[in-house]
Image (cartoon, rainbow, N blue to C red):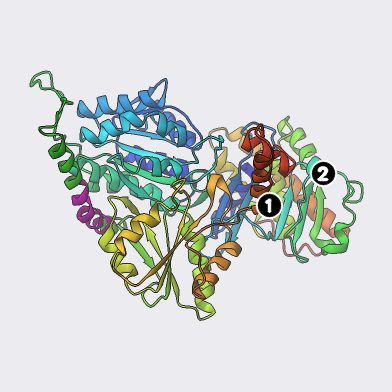
Amino acid sequence: MLRQIEGSRAVAETVARCRPEVVCAYPISPQTHIIEALGELVKSGALAPCEFLNVESEFAAMSVAIGASAAGARAFTATASQGLLFMMEAVYNASGLGLPIVMTLANRAVGAPINIWNDHSDAMAARDAGWVQLFAETIQEAADLHVQAFRLAEELSVPVMVCMDGFILTHATELVDLPSQEAVDAFLPPYEPRQVLDPDEPYSIGAMVGPEAFEEVRYLAHARQLSALGRIPELAEEFAEAFGRDSGGLVHPYRSADAEVVVVALGSVLGTIKDVVDAHREAGHRIGALGITAFRPFPGDAVRNALADAQRVVVVEKAFSVGFGGVLSTDVAMALSGLPVSLSTVVAGLGGRPITKTSLQSVFEAALRGEAERLTFLDLKTELVERELERMALRRRSGPTAENVLRDIGTVRSGVG
Amino acid sequence: MTAADLLALAAFTDGRRAQSFPSFGSERTGAPVVAYCRLAEREIRTREPVVAPDCVVVIDPTLVHQVDLFSGLDGDGYVLVNSSRSLQTLGLGSLAEHFRPERLLTVGATDVARRQLGRPLPNAALLGGFAALTAQVTLAAVSAAIRARFGRDSALAERNVAAASEVFQQACLALTADGRAVLSAPAD
């Protein structure tokens, strides 16, 4: 049914139609509305049978999800930012144990400095945690990815994280075709666990594994993730047949077939990028985009195929590895190794800084002229940076950087205006 | 935020595409907040904040001299300020030099809301003024959006619909009294 609906609500209602039996979470912006809505649906009886657990922390949320999943229940949770980091030990355990938990990550920056707004630092911090990571471009895709996520997770016994941009998607409203209960039931069979804690047939899950077999167990986890590379596009195709729209898959090329310059990105910024690509195309420039939906496992071959004919690739990413540079671009560079393609990284949208068409346009123009730098920070206020560097050079007790920079701006406020 | 969401919902009711989203500041009731709404005939893909609005709706008139609310608004833009005072009284008389006077309007939506709802919550009511001023959505669609949003409390929904209708009528009158064309703002 077509509705004008908030992203969080759309995800909550879609998750409810996936019939989770346990939902456990600790509230954190910008995930809160998803969990509130699911709580309402459980309380009203619309989502039944389902146990909704208020837990005392994110660590507990993931621990409860692990317990529920090991006992054979379909388990769901959601978090963001510091919440993900706080549960990180359990995040690794969920994947190490092969438990098909689905988690929404409402992408938010990681402190310090504390910041509630969107970027991808949280998802990147969990990049190597053994979870499948899918990135949604729109609210529609965020909703749809959850249906595919439960199916993928349970088929392969791997946990899946659906990443959606905090606020930009969670708190926006747009037109969404919510999957119906009947259609979801037809797509997603009841959970049949590969391993289950059963008092009638007792065994343990979570053995200590020494050097004699640790590598093999980890290798098998890797092999399972790699098998998702085959399964993700198949599920997206099946989803398209059942629901009549393209959601999910590994990558989404956009006007890139004959492009000299291709812009690569994850998540909702692709919408803005596509608008800018269209404007350049109208001006006769050969530019396109490549959206990466599956970030883990990384679809190296699909990325390589999609970018093989490009001359220059620009990776726009909402996170970076301090002291190194792009995270996504490292993977893209690996995928392109041996090809005569030049790669540049644009770090953008950190801590919720708006990524505007005007700024993207100048970046793309530079790339079209062949003048893109290897690593740039979009709209970096260099004068602020220089003032703090000067202060630090001038005296030892220069004080806390965040407070100094805010004082230079002239107002300690939180993003309005 | 409620106003932007309701406006998007109203446009959806009218069969258009819409996108609404907030720019969050401090998460507490009463804190200044900017919310955006785009209306279009086709899919809206961009996620950047609205930098060049066609209309600025000021819900809290105490902010007009604290932030530059009208930057990016072009000469054909609309301004709707929630106040029972005139633009001159609010110190915004100079707006008429930059924008078309027939596209500038103040309406006392808070007064109407206080009367209709017993509380100073002007968001829904103000959309009646937006419908009258811009004709981008119909009053019927605004009413349908309010009913959909407050569906669980139909009495509250009806009071908000009444408030929006009253502000719509007030706005139409004000626009007519000034000799402005209101024929473009049908009630349904």
Left or right? Give the position of A15 relative to B42.
Answer: left
Q: Position of residue A168 (x, y in %)?
A: 52, 48
The answer to which quarter of the image holds residue A358 is bottom right
Q: Secondary structure at mark 1?
A: helix
Mark 2 or 1: in front is: 1
Residue A73: percent from left, percent from top: 23, 29
Instruction: Decide if residue B104 is on the left or right side of residue B28.
Output: right
Q: Decide which of A75, A393 is in the foreground and name it.
A: A393
User: Total label count?
Assistant: 2
Closer to the camera in the image, A159 or A368: A368
Horizontally, residue B6 falls left or right of residue A217, namely: right
Res. A300 image quadrant: bottom left
Residue that badge 2 annotates: B83
Which residue ends up furthest to the left in the rendered image?
A: A201
Q: Are marks 2 and 1 on the same chain?
A: no
**Residue that numbered label 1 is attached to:** A383
Q: Chain of mark 1?
A: A
Residue range of the region highlighted in magenta in the rendering? A225-239
Q: Secondary structure at mark 2?
A: loop
Residue at 75%, 64% in the rendered image: B74
